[in-house]
Image (spheres, coloured by chain):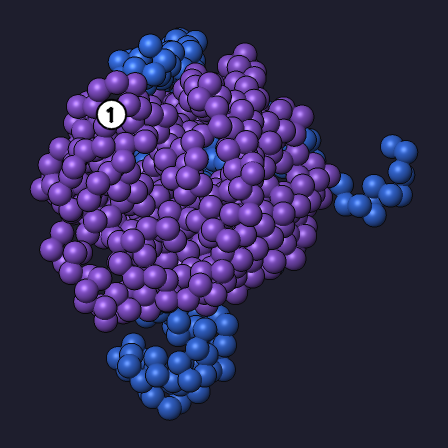
Chain colours: A blue, B purple
Amino acid sequence: MFESKSGVLLIGGLGFFLFAFLSNAVVPILLYRHLPEQSVEQLVENNQNLMYQFEDLYVRYPETFKKYYGEPTQEAAAEALRLGRQVYIGEGCWHCHSQFVRPVSNESDRWGKVAFSEEYQNELQRPVMFGTRRVGPDLSREGGRRGNDWHAVHFFDPPLVSPNSPMPKYTWFYDGLSFDALLARLEQQDPKLLETLKAELGDDLAAKRAEVVAQLQARRPELAAELEASPDAPNKRGLAIITYVQWLGSWLEQYPDYENYVPLDEEMENPLE
Amino acid sequence: MTVSANQAGDIPPVEIPDGELVEERLVLWYFYAALAYLFISMAGGLMMALQLVEWNPLQGSEYLSPGRWRMIHTNAVAYGFIANAFLGALHWAVPRLTLRPVASRRLSYFIFDAWQIVVLSTAVGILFGHAQGIEWGETPTWIDPLALAGLALVAFNFMVPIAKTTGPLYVTLWYFMAAFVWTFLTYAMGNFMPEYYVPGSSGGAIAGLFIHDLVGLFVTPLAWGLMYYFVPILLKKPIWSHGLSLVGFWGLAFFYPLNGIHHFLYTPIPMFLQYGAVVATIAVEMVVTTVIINFFATIWGSTRQLVTNLPIRWFYSGMVLYFVTCAQCAMQVTLTFQKLIHFTDWVVGHAHLVMFGVFRVWFFGMMTYLFPRLLRAPWYSRTLCEWHYWLSIGGITVMFIDLGLAGMFQGYYWASLRPWDESVIGSQPFWMIRLFSGLAIIAGQITFVYNLFMTWRLSRKAPAWSTALATA
C-alpha cells in the first residue's frame, strides 16, 4: 500500500491533503460563519470618520477630486476604497506593511487595539491583507493618525516628510498642476520672480505659457516639475490610496490611535516611573 | 542505447533506440528558460535591495516600481526558474525511470510554450499593477485558470508513462506522483478560495496553507524525488535505507500540509489551530532529519566525491542548507521566537536560504551534471564552475546570516517602542551587506551563464558530438 500507485495517489496525494484542508481551512470557516462578509457599501455607511476624511480630501484637492469622484458621496467613497485596495495590492504595499496588531512585543502600545476577527470579515479583506513583512509600520490603525496632506506629500516623496525613509516614491499617483495653479503658486512662493517675468513677458502670462515654462525650468526647476506631477494634485489612484489608508482602523472606538511613546530623555528623568 | 533498469527493481534491461526516450532538446530549452527567468528575478531582488539602502537610481516610473518588482522577483523564481527547471529535469528523469517516453511529445512542446506564456504574462500583469493579493500567488486572476490547466496537462503527460510501469515503484516516483496531485490542488485552493469565497481570517488560513504547500507540496517533493534519482546514479550505489525513504515520504505527506497556519501566528485565526500548526512543523523537522540521515549514510565511504564531483558537492551542500533551514524552522515556529522575529528580515533570510540555498543549489547541481550531456561537450572551464559554486554558496551563506541578525535587531527595535525610523536606520548596515552578498550571487550566475555559452560554442565546433542532438 505504501509503495503502490493507488496508495501514493489516494492516501498521500488526496487523503492527507484533504485532511489538512478540512482541519486547517474548513474549521476556521465554520468557526466564523456567524460573521457574514460585509460589502464596501456597508463599511462606508455610518462610518463618520471615513466620510470626514473623504470630505477633507474634497476640500483640499477640489480640482482633481471633482474630476475623478465628483461629490464626496458614500458611493464615491466606496468606489475610492475599492480602487484603493487594488492599488494597495498592485503596488505591493502589503509586502512592506502588515495589517494586524499582535498581542505581543508591545505592539498594542505602538498601534492600539489588538487585531480581532470581525475587522477582517469584509470585501476589502478578501484576500486578507495580513501581510508577512514589516519594512514600514503596521497600517491597520493608520486611519486618522496623519492628515491627508501629509499622506499626499509622503506618497509623492517619502523622505520629504520622513527623513531616511526607504519607502519608494509613488509619483504616478499624481497629476500635474494646472498652469493657473502654477502661477498662483509662484505668486505665493516667489512674488519677485513673478514680477520679473511680467516685466519681461508682459502682464498676461497665461498667454505666454511656453516662455514662462522655459523661464521657470531655468530658474525654479522644482516648480516647473510640478506641471508633470505635483503632491498637490493626487489623481484617481492617489485619492483612492489615501482614502484606503484613512479607512484602516476608522471603525474603532479608539480613533485615531496615537502611539504610546515617551522620548527617551523624558523617560530618563524619572527612570523609576 | 541500453538503459540498465537498476532503478526499477527486477525489470530486465530494455532496448530503446537512441533519442526516443528523452526529448533532450526540450530539457535544454527548459533549462535555458529557467536561467532567463533567474536573471529577471535577480534584477527584481537587486532593485529592492538598492531601494532599501536608498540607492535605487530608477525612481519615478511606475513600471520600475520596487514594490511591483519585488513580486516579479518571487514569482519569476517560483514559476519561472523553479517550475521550468523542474519540467526540464522531469523530462530527463521520468522517461529514464519508467523506461517509457512521456505521453506525447507534441503535448510536451505545447506545454513548454504555454508555460512560458503563463510566466511572461504573470510578469507583465504584475508590472502593470494587476497583481493578486496572495503571497506567492500574485499571478493576476485571469491567468490562474490557464496555469491550472497547464498543471493538469503536465500531470497527464508524466503520469501516462508512470502508470504503465509495473512492479514496485522507486521512491522518486512516489514523490513525483504525489506532487502532481498536490500541486494542482494547492494551486486551485490558494488562488481561488481566498480571492472569491473566503474573506478575513479564515481566508488568511487558506493563504497560509497555500504559501506553505507551494514550497512543501510542489517544490519539496519534486526536488527530493530528483535527489533520490540523481544521487545514487552519481555515487553509483543505492540509497542507504529503503525504510527511511518510506518514513521520509509518508512523514512529509502527512505533516507538511498541516503547517500552513504557522505563517500567520498571533493573528485572529483560532489559537488552537495555530498550536496545531506549530506542532506539525516541529514534526516535519523530525521527518527531515531521517531523510538527511539517509542521504549522508549513502555518501558515507565516498566522501571524497564531495571534493571531486561537483554535482555531488552541489547536492550535498543543498542538503546541509536544507537541514539548517528546517532546524531554523523548528525554532522560529515556536510562539516564543515568533514574538521577536515575525515580520522581520529573519524570515526573508529563511526564504532565501530555502529557495536559493537549497532548491536552486540542487538545480545548479543537476545543470552542472546535465549540460555537458545535453550539449555533448565537456564544460568549457572547470574553474568557472568552481567560481559559480563558491560565489553562490558564499553569497547565500553571508546573506542568510546577515538577514537573520538583522531580523533579531529589528525585532528588538520594535519591541523597545523607539520610533520606527530607528529600526530602519539600524537596519542599514545589514541591508548594505545583503546588497553585496546578493551581488556576489549575481556574479556567480554570470560566470555560470558565460561558462555555459562557451560550452555551447564548443559543442557547435565539434560536429561529431552534436549530430546526435540535432537529429534527436
Quarter residue A170 falls in: bottom left
Q: Taking B231 as reference, is B304 left or right? A: right
Q: Helix, strand, or loop for circle 1?
A: loop
A247 to B471, vertically: above or below? above
Residue B314 in sight in this render: no
Residue B101 percent coordinates (x, y) = 16, 36
Residue B183 percent coordinates (x, y) = 30, 29
B81 to B250, vertically: above or below? below
The residue that disc 1 covers is B11
Residue at 26% across, 13% down: A6
Residue B168 percent coordinates (x, y) = 30, 18
Q: Taking B327 as reference, is A189 left or right? A: left
Question: Amino acid under label 1?
Answer: Ile
Question: Where, quadrant-wise, is the C terminus of chain A in this rendering?
Answer: top right
Residue B136 percent coordinates (x, y) = 38, 38
